Image: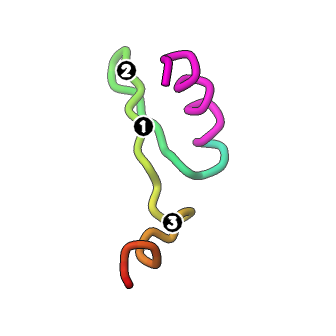
Amino acid sequence: MHQPTESAHLRVLPGAGFVSARTDRKQRIHRLEKEPYALDSWLMP
């Protein structure tokens, strides 16, 4: 995926609650949020 495409996705995903972001100097650090995905039900048989 190209950088402009990633940037476009990362602008939308925090508003939907799928990722959170924090600023560290000149960088934005994104983190995948567990709740919207219900990952436990996907990972456990």
Eyeballing the image, is 39 above or below 27? below
Say which amino acid is labelled 2: Gln
- Please tell me how crowded label 3 is: few (under 14), some (14-19), or many (20+) other residues with Cα within 10 Å: few
* Numbered tag placed on residue 10 in the rendering: none
Q: Where is mark 3, residue-wise? A: 35
The image position of residue 35, as x and y in percent, is 51, 65
The quadrant the C terminus occupies is bottom left
Name the image colouring: rainbow
Q: Residue furthest bottom?
A: 45
Q: Quadrant of residue 15?
A: top right
- Please tell me how crowded label 2 is: few (under 14), some (14-19), or many (20+) other residues with Cα within 10 Å: few
Q: How many marks?
A: 3
**Gap in angstroms between the C-alphas marked 2 and 3:** 25 Å
Q: Is residue 18 left or right of residue 16?
A: left
Q: Residue furthest left?
A: 25
Q: Secondary structure at mark 1?
A: strand
Q: Where is mark 2, residue-wise? A: 27
Say which amino acid is labelled 1: His
Q: Where is mark 1, residue-wise? A: 30
**Gap in angstroms between the C-alphas marked 1 and 2:** 10 Å
**Foreground of the two, 5 or 35:** 5
Mark 3 or mark 1: whose residue is earlier in sequence = 1
Say which amino acid is labelled 3: Glu
> Which residues are drawn in magenta?
1-13
The reply to whether the C-beta atoms of the residues labelled 1 and 2 are less than 8 Å apart is: no
